Image (cartoon, rainbow, N blue to C red):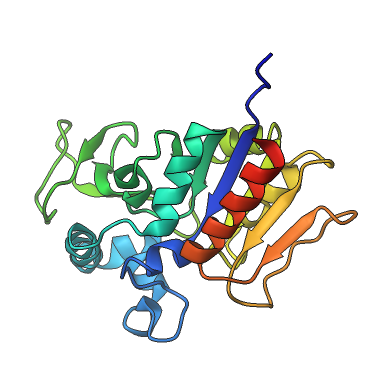
């Protein structure tokens, strides 16, 4: 009799996209050294200078077009062959989808989308640049469909439900400094094993018992090691 597929929930952060050439915000030479977070990733910044905000995300969108999924993205997609895999990502790029992952929850929105400033449920695909004067069907200015600092995270409730039902929980390429996403692993059942993949020794999770496996590797090689462990253990 076939064994039931385990539910693998993976929380990913900027570290996995950095290997595809997408600059992170917090690392040395990151985007925050060129831009103040308050100017380009907050409602107040949007009110002050929407043109700057649109230009910032237009630059990020053009950069994304030249980026390709890396081995970390691809292996996570391959794990769908063996596990009921759900990726919950803090990243706003589409590299997980382009690598083949079919179940991706974007906590912080999508770079490839814009939405109405009047009705946040009116969401549109952004294939190219978005400029002042580009409006939704209601006549209001379009803004990036990104969750900015100070804004609620609409997908968080869904992510908590998913984490609460995880048989295996993995954390890949995130410093666990951005809340509320950083708290997601805490919702996994007490008996659920946790795999933390990050090259830095200072990224830790608080947990009861010895259920945390630390893999101090960059995302691509760390995910490959985790895959070997999971296949040996569960398949």
Q: How many marks?
A: 0
Q: Nearer the viewer, residue 195 or 141?
A: 195
Q: Who's the residue at 83% across and 41% down the image?
A: 191
Residue at figure coordinates x 30%, y 61% from the top left: 47
Camera-side residue of 160 and 204: 204
Q: Quadrant of the C terminus?
A: top right
Q: In the image, 20: left or right of 105? A: left
Q: Residue at x 72, y 68 (%)?
A: 204
Q: Is residue 28 above or below residue 124?
A: below
Image spot of residue 18 (x, y percent) = 39, 69
* 91 and 38: which is toward the camera: 91
When the figure is inspected, residue 227 is found, relative to residue 41, above or below; the finding is: above
Q: Quadrant of residue 67?
A: bottom left
In the rendered image, residue 193, in percent from the top left (x then y), is placed at 76, 47
Q: Is residue 107 visible?
A: no
Q: Residue at x 52, y 44 (%)?
A: 88
Q: Is residue 62 left or right of residue 3?
A: left
Is residue 54 visible in the rendered structure shown here? Answer: yes
Q: Left or right: 205 with respect to 139?
A: right
In the drawing, does residue 33 fall left or right of residue 189? left
- Quarter of the rendering containing residue 187: top right
Q: Which residue of the protein is positioned furthest toward the top in this rendering?
A: 1
Residue 215 to residue 148: above or below? below
Is 213 in front, or is 107?
213
Q: x%, y% of residue 113?
A: 26, 44
Residue 51 lies in quadrant? bottom left
Q: Quadrant of the N terminus?
A: top right
* Relative height, residue 187 to residue 182 (above, below): above
């Amino acid at each position: 009799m076939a064994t039931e597929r385990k539910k693998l929930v993976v929380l990913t952060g900027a570290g996995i996209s950095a290997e595809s050439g997408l600059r992170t915000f917090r690392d040395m030479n990151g985007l925050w050294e060129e831009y103040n977070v308050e100017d380009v990733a907050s409602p107040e910044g949007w009110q002050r200078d929407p043109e700057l905000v649109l230009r910032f995300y237009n630059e990020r969108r053009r950069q994304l077009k030249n980026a390709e999924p890396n081995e970390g993205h691809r292996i996570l997609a391959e794990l769908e062959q063996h596990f009921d895999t759900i990726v919950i990502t803090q990243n706003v790029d589409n590299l997980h989808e382009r690598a083949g992952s079919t179940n991706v929850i974007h906590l912080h929105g999508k770079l490839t989308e814009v939405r109405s400033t009047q009705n946040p449920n009116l969401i549109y695909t952004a294939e190219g640049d978005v400029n002042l004067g580009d409006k939704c069907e209601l006549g209001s200015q379009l803004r990036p469909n990104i969750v900015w600092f100070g804004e609620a995270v609409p997908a968080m409730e869904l992510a908590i439900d998913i984490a609460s039902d995880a048989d295996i929980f993995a954390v890949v390429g995130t410093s666990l400094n951005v809340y509320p996403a950083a708290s997601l692993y805490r919702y996994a059942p007490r008996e659920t094993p946790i795999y933390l993949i990050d090259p830095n020794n200072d990224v830790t999770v608080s947990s009861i018992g010895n259920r945390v496996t630390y893999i101090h590797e960059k995302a691509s090689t760390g995910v490959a090691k985790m895959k070997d462990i999971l296949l040996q253990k569960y398949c």
